[in-house]
Image (tube, helix red, strand yellow):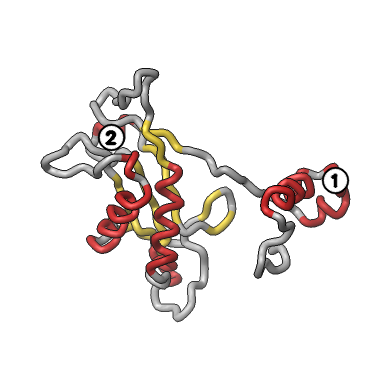
Amino acid sequence: MSKYFCKADGQFMAELVEVCQQYHRRLGELATESKPLGLTFSVLMVHDEKNLDADEILLPTLMHHGAPALAKVRAMPTPFRAHGLGDVELLVDGDRWKRLGKPTRYAVLDHELTHVELVFDDAGRLQRDDCGRPKVQIRPHDWQFGWFAEVAERHGTASIEVQQASMIQANAGQLLFPGMGEPA
């Protein structure tokens, strides 16, 4: 599978800024010439050569823990930042992205930005790395699922699958999600 990468265009970056300003003010302003020490993003659109001329997406372009992903985010290591890359790297499945409507694009960006947390000291001051860049860490999901239907069937309430589903039902009033089909 041959993948290629390209930088996100101006429209993507404008949407990223808009979502950041609307939902993630705590991340602060993105870096500008007047504010060079603001948080920066390196955004790459990832494409799969096999999807280039296809009417439909043939293969997932991005994977995360073995599952297709629309986007992935990570805090950049200090050496990469020293080379001038962003504080945060965002990889986006460019093949699927172009087919999404604006509400879904904004929801995906909001999701990825929710992973990004600035690091503050006990006095509430923003911590900086050796390059003077804002320190960031990646926040895990509030809920993480990795279920096997057959394990739930074999072990019932002893399985983590049924325990997590029961917790969701108790907190959200439902066991199954609307529109959720058979497990893949």
Q: Residue furthest left?
A: 34
State the SS at label 2: helix
Side of 10 where 88 appears, left or right: right
Residue 26 is at least partly visible in this image? yes
Q: Position of residue 146 (x, y in %)?
A: 67, 49
Q: Residue at x 23, y 38 (%)?
A: 38
Residue at the disc numbered 2: 81
Q: Is residue 92 above or below residue 86?
A: below
Side of 116 where 157 appears, left or right: right
Rendered image: mark on residue 157: 1
Q: Quadrant of residue 29?
A: top left
Q: Residue at x 62, y 46 (%)?
A: 144
Q: Earlier in the sequence, mark 2 or mark 1?
A: 2
Q: Position of residue 97 (x, y in %)?
A: 40, 66
Q: Residue at x 85, y 42 (%)?
A: 158
Q: Position of residue 28 (x, y in %)?
A: 28, 40
Rendered image: mark on residue 137: none
Q: Are marks 2 and 1 in contact (CB under 8 Å)?
A: no
Q: Residue furthest bottom?
A: 55
